[in-house]
Every structure is written in structure tokens, then in C-alpha cells.
Image (cartoon, rainbow, N blue to C red):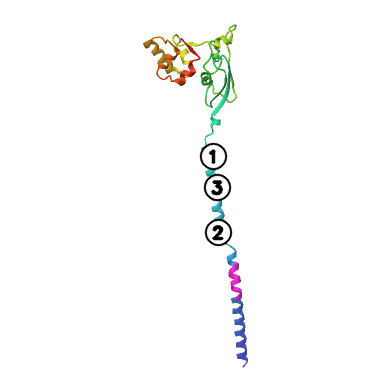
């Protein structure tokens, strides 16, 4: 009889345990799903950071690829024995010689030997060409024009838009065709366009 009562007690205890597990099991499993795996979170965070870095690098690269014209030019001031003094915006790698040529070249008696024509210019630089003589008014010299019939190749080369090659062509034209009868005739020389002539017409004569 005692054995039967004891066996009933064990049955009741087991049933209580099973009932408790039945009701507690959803709570246990829900708690385990709420907390995500830390390794998964770390992997997701790493992916987000990697994507952000790629976007940042892409933006930086695109910005670097955009050329900045202002960084490739400088402004210099030219005065003194020069055909057209003033402010000039030139490429940053230009030399003083390039700037002088852009300004129409030095006037007669301009002391260009005191300047290093091969020196690279700096932004804001003041280039002043002195006169190497005394007594002649600068205004008279500034109005002096180059005679395209009698000028040497070196004098022709000093004209704006005329380089050594074009100066030789002008000289060859004079020898084969004769003297120019008007300043407009210089446009018959191969390579002298209307644009080049506009730079020359106030600086040449016959």
C-alpha cells in the first residue's frame, strides 16, 4: 500500500515538472531569439563601414579628377620698356620670356639682359624692364613700329604671334615676292591668320 502511494507522488511530481516546462518553454526560446549573435552584429557593422569608406573614397577621387583652372594659371604685372604693359594671366609654368612675348615684346633699348628670361614666373610677380639709356622719352619709343619690309628675322620674331618659323616665312616671302605694299599684305604669308594680324596691325608698318 505504501509503495502505491509513493509511486503516485512521483507521478504527480513528474507531471508538475512537465507542466512547468510546457509553460516556460516559449519564454525561454523567445529570450534566446531577442539577443542577436555578437559575431553577426560585428560582421554587419564591418560591411556598413566598408561601404561608407568606399563611397567616401569614390567622392574624394571624383573631386580630385576635376581640373581647377585657377591652379594652372598665374597673374603677373609687366611694366617698363614693354610694348603693352599691364596685367597678364599666363600658364603657371610660363617663363619671364613667355610673358614679355605675350606683352608684345620689349621696346627698343629695353634692358632685357638684366632679366633672367628663363626664370619661371610666380603669381603676383612684378616684371619691370628698365631702359638702358638716358634722354629719350619713353612715349616716343612705345609708338615705334616694326617695318615689315626692312626688319630682321630677330625683330620680326619679337612681334606678338610671330615665332622664329613665321619670321623666316616672312623673310622668304619678301625675297620671293618683293616688298609689302601694305601691312595687310602680310596676311599672304602662310600661317598669318586674321587673328594673328589683329595682334600685329598696331605694331607694324611699311
Q: Position of residue 39 (x, y in %)?
A: 56, 59
- Label 3's element? helix
Q: Is residue 160 visible?
A: no
- Mark 3, residue position: 53
Crowding at dot 2, Cα within 10 Å, few <14 / some 14-19 / many 20+, comes out as few
Distance of label 2 from label 3 (alpha carbons):
20 Å
Quarter of the image holding residue 142?
top right
72 relative to 189, above or below: below
Earlier residue among tags 3 and 1:
3
- Mark 1, residue position: 63
Nearer to us in this view, 32 or 13: 32
- Mark 2, residue position: 40
What residue is rendered at 55% in x and 45% in y? 56
Q: Is residue 38 visible?
A: yes
What residue is rendered at 59% in x and 73% in y? 25
- Label 2's element? helix
Q: Are marks 2 and 3 in contact (CB under 8 Å)?
A: no
Which secondary structure dominates the residues rendered in magenta? Answer: helix
Q: Position of residue 120 (x, y in %)?
A: 54, 23
The quadrant in which the N terminus is found is: bottom right
What residue is rendered at 52% in x and 44% in y? 58
Q: Position of residue 189 (x, y in %)?
A: 40, 16
Q: What is the magenta range?
A: 23-31
Earlier residue among tags 2 and 3:
2
Q: Position of residue 22 (x, y in %)?
A: 59, 76
- Label 1's element? helix
Nearer to us in this view, 5 or 191: 191
Amino acid at each position: 500500500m505504501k509503495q502505491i502511494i509513493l509511486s503516485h507522488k512521483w507521478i504527480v511530481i513528474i507531471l508538475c515538472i512537465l507542466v512547468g516546462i510546457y509553460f516556460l518553454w516559449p519564454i525561454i526560446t523567445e529570450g534566446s531569439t531577442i539577443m542577436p549573435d555578437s559575431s553577426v552584429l560585428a560582421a554587419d557593422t564591418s560591411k556598413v563601414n566598408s561601404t561608407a569608406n568606399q563611397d567616401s573614397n569614390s567622392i574624394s577621387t571624383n573631386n580630385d579628377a576635376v581640373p581647377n583652372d585657377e591652379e594652372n594659371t598665374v597673374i603677373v604685372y609687366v611694366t617698363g620698356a614693354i610694348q603693352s604693359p599691364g596685367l597678364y594671366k599666363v600658364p603657371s609654368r610660363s617663363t619671364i620670356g613667355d610673358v614679355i612675348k605675350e606683352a608684345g615684346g620689349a621696346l627698343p633699348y629695353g634692358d632685357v639682359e638684366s632679366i633672367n628670361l628663363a626664370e619661371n614666373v610666380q603669381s603676383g610677380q612684378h616684371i619691370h624692364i628698365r631702359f638702358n639709356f638716358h634722354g629719350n622719352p619713353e612715349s616716343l619709343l612705345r609708338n615705334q613700329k616694326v617695318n615689315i619690309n626692312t626688319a630682321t628675322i630677330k625683330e620680326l620674331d619679337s612681334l606678338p604671334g610671330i615665332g622664329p618659323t613665321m619670321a623666316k616665312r616672312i623673310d622668304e616671302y619678301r625675297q620671293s615676292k618683293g616688298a609689302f605694299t601694305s601691312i595687310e599684305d602680310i596676311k599672304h604669308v602662310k600661317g598669318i591668320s586674321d587673328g594673328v594680324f589683329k595682334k600685329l596691325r598696331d605694331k607694324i608698318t611699311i
